[in-house]
Amino acid sequence: MVKVAIVCEGKNDRDFLQALISHLGLAVVNQINFYIFRGKSELLNPDHDRYLDDLKLEIEAGQISKILFVVDADNDESDAIKGGYENTQTALDALMAKLDVITISQSHIFCDPKTKLGYLESFVLSTISEAEKNCIERFLECSQFHSKESHKAILNQIYKTAYPNAPYNFSHPNFERLKAVLTQLFT
């Protein structure tokens, strides 16, 4: 049986990925070890205890055979070194090299596929109609929430409230790459 580690920034990422994995019927719970970090900076730190004390030991013991790193692109204006799609991919590549896990690893960067900026919530917004997206964005502008974390949490809650019965449009073309990555991960 393939045992997979999924490394992600936070609980919302884990919950989202679990929903997609379940939707695709790809794995059972005991096939996946989620490594949840407290943000991008911790996840991209190759000296973090979670890598050194947990993940590396599980790899060496043969308990993990594949790894998926999932991180937000954010934007390069707020972080010129690790923000934006290209900088994030460069940082992920350096992390995988430093951890010596390139041969068993893949990565996925959450962002708006058109702008290559943003985070999980930006990706999710890219899968709904322009009218629905404009409605949510207008509310966020009116609410005057300026903190990124508040913005993400509110956006996540608005989306879940607005679409309680079908929270994600997994058939949207923007999901194809992530579905392919996950499918390859579990085969």
Image (tube, rainbow, N blue to C red):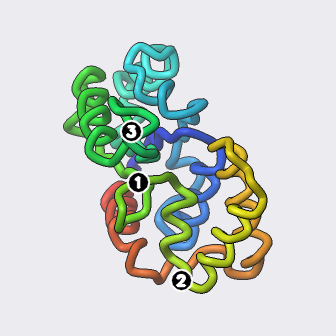
Q: Position of residue 66 (x, y in %)?
A: 34, 43
Q: Quadrant of the C terminus?
A: bottom left
Q: Is residue 75 above or below residue 133?
A: above
Mark pair 1, 2: CA separation: 18 Å
Image quadrant in which you'd find residue 172: bottom left
Q: In this view, does 29 lie above or below 5?
A: below
The residue depicted at 74 percent of the width and 56 percent of the height is 154
* Sooner in the amino-acid sequence: mark 3 or mark 2: 3
Q: Where is residue 137 in the image (x, y as percent from the top left)?
A: 64, 68
* Sooner in the amino-acid sequence: mark 1 or mark 2: 1
The residue depicted at 38 percent of the width and 51 percent of the height is 109
The residue depicted at 20 percent of the width and 38 percent of the height is 103
Amino acid at the residue labelled 1? Leu
Image quadrant in which you'd find residue 135: bottom right
Which numbered disc covers residue 117? 1
Q: Is residue 166 above or below residue 109?
A: below
Give the residue pinned by disc 3. Answer: 83
Which numbered disc covers residue 147? none
Give the residue pinned by disc 2. Answer: 130
Amino acid at the residue labelled 2? Glu
Amino acid at the residue labelled 3? Gly
